[in-house]
Amino acid sequence: VVVQVEAGGINTATTPPSAVATKVVIGSEVLGRIDAVATDATGTTLRIAGQDVRVTPGVTVLDDRFTGGAADLVVGATVEVYGAFDAANGRIGATRIEPEAATAAPRVRGPVSAITGTVLRIGASDYVAASVPAGVAVGSIVRLKLQPLPDGQGRWTVASFAGGAVALPDADEAELEGRVTSIAGLPGSFQINGVTVDARAISTAGVVLGLKVEVEGTAAGGVLTARKIELK
């Protein structure tokens, strides 16, 4: 689950360190109809709004409204998925799935891996826009609201864009946890969910695409300057 917490100063005198939250925002990764279901020995992969979603026993929590459990995750059901995009495998690792109304407009959040004209590649699928907003480039995290159905080529049509990256306010004490979505700037920098981490002052050994990391440091201008990186 992508959770953004804004808080006051971090009290390092407590164990663990603590802070009083002033704002909490929770965002989902994809909402839409399940178009395909494939099960193997370790879990299930759903195709939703063009995205592959990995459902793993013991990791993915299903809402109590799924009275039949995982058996309710069938083709035609409309669901909302919380979790994190796994860039190394090009799919979403689901941590929570909730049922949604069939009339809910599909949407997807994720990193852009390629742009051809006005066609954006996210995960396993192409998304066709009337135009690409200024500032959207390969590596950008975007949130797309989609037309209800894909076109004849299996591509989804973008109805509207919104920024999908975590908004990082300036702070003397900042902490970011998530999966690495870009390593193009290594060894000096990398990205977590679209947020740039300036790691020039410390080692980035072991940081690879898709790895879950926790970074502590200071934030300014939307960039987190790291003083500590923990590999998860």
Image (cartoon, rainbow, N blue to C red):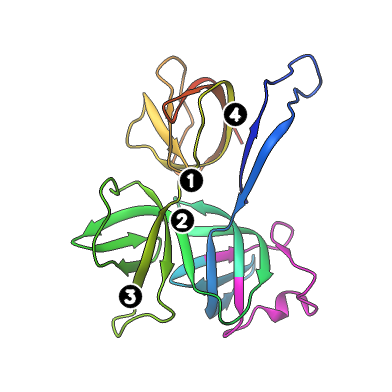
Which range of residues does the magenta coloring cover?
Answer: 53-79
Within 10 Å of disc 3 (Cα), the crowding (few <14, some 14-19, many 20+) is some
Give the number of the mark in front: 4 or 2. 4
Disc 2 versus disc 1: distance between alpha carbons? 8 Å
Query: What residue is drawn where x is 50% and y is 42%?
Result: 166
Q: Secondary structure at mark 1?
A: loop
The answer to whether residue 154 is above or below residue 166 is below
Disc 3 versus disc 4: distance between alpha carbons? 37 Å
Q: On the image, numbered disc 4 is attached to which residue?
A: 175
Q: Residue 85: x percent and y percent? A: 50, 53
Q: Which amino acid type is marked by label 3?
A: Arg
Q: Is residue 44 left or right of residue 10?
A: left
Where residue 154 sits, quadrant-wise, is: bottom left
Q: Of callouts 4 and 2, which one flags the residue occurring earlier in the amino acid sequence?
A: 2
Disc 1 versus disc 4: distance between alpha carbons? 18 Å
Q: On the image, numbered disc 2 is attached to which residue?
A: 89
Give the number of the mark in front: 3 or 2. 3
Q: On the image, numbered disc 3 is attached to which residue?
A: 155
Q: Of callouts 2 and 1, which one flags the residue occurring earlier in the amino acid sequence?
A: 2
Q: Secondary structure at mark 2?
A: loop
Q: Which residue is at the front of the view, 184 or 196?
A: 196
Q: Residue 127: x percent and y percent? A: 33, 67
Q: Secondary structure at mark 4?
A: strand
The answer to whether residue 169 is above or below residue 211 is above
Q: Of callouts 3 and 4, which one flags the residue occurring earlier in the amino acid sequence?
A: 3
